[in-house]
Image (spheres, helix red, strand yellow):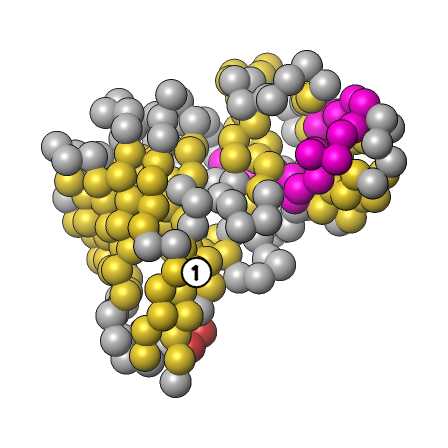
Amino acid sequence: GAGVSQTPSNKVTEKGKYVELRCDPISGHTALYWYRQSLGQGPEFLIYFQGTGAADDSGLPNDRFFAVRPEGSVSTLKIQRTERGDSAVYLCASSLISGAFGGEQFFGPGTRLTVL
Amino acid sequence: GENVEQHPSTLSVQEGDSAVIKCTYSDSASNYFPWYKQELGKRPQLIIDIRSNVGEKKDQRIAVTLNKTAKHFSLHITETQPEDSAVYFCAAYGTALIFGKGTTLSVSS
């Protein structure tokens, strides 16, 4: 079946602009995760959803970052007033259920965000 | 919160040699420890994982060991091949999946 998909694959924006990044999880996966990966670093946890609700948003760096998953499937990560330091690859992952016993997290290809 | 340390940051081996990557974690409540392989420009892919109720798991040339008392776990790759060259990440799941900084493995033929 189809894996996790993310759009766009690349996004270039100017400092101060607003961006939305979209994630389509594997069908039937109830848990969805967002990570940010900077060059030479491991993925950094941002937020995860169990169904429609954000179960843990402790990784969001500040209130410019927000994510939604209104119907429990597709999720959108929203970044307001972008800064150059937001430039990174934003990865989305999904798993059948959440938690340590939720099984493998399958990653999408990522969105490379560049803030000029 | 959880903190995961990974060593070494780079590792170069000859084809056929073994490679070992070590990680430590801080949260004793963490109970799931996956390892991901990431090739340049690609997404991370799970290669093996271990849960806290076992001490070792093996899958062909790859094995992982876990020492919960010492809070460390290791990845062992035997008979390395050039296609094993990639960045490897360990991770620990307590309340969220926290990754190490990665190890760049280079296997030369």
Per the image, the residue denoted by label 1 is B104
- Label 1 packing within 10 angstroms: few (<14), some (14-19), many (20+): many
- Label 1 sits on what residue type? Thr
Secondary structure under badge 1?
strand
Q: Chain of mark 1?
A: B
Residue at (75%, 49%) from the top-left corner? A9
Image position of A19 with respect to B80: above or below: above
Residue at point 28% right, 80% down? Answer: B16
Q: Is residue A96 visible?
A: yes
Outermost residue, left side:
B69
Q: Residue furthest bottom?
A: B109
Residue B41 in the figure: left or right of residue A10: left
Residue A104: x and y, percent? 43, 42
In the picture, measured across the screen, residue A17 lies left or right of residue A51, that is right
Q: Quadrant location of the N terminus of chain B?
A: top left
Q: Nearer the viewer, residue A75 or B30?
A: B30
Is A79 inside the magenta-drawn segment?
yes
Residue A64 image position (x, y, % from top left):
72, 19
Q: In the rendered view, would you say A41 is above or below A32? A: below
Q: Is residue B88 magenta?
A: no
The answer to whether one can see residue A4 in this image is no
- The span picked out in magenta is A77-95
Which quarter of the figure is the C terminus of chain B placed in?
A: bottom left
- Residue at 58 percent across and 42 percent down: it is A37
Percent position (x, y) of residue A16?
85, 26
**The image quarter in which residue A92 lies:** top right
User: Residue at position x 60%, y 37% from top?
Assistant: A36
Q: Measuring from the top left, give residue A102's x and y in whole percent.
A: 40, 32
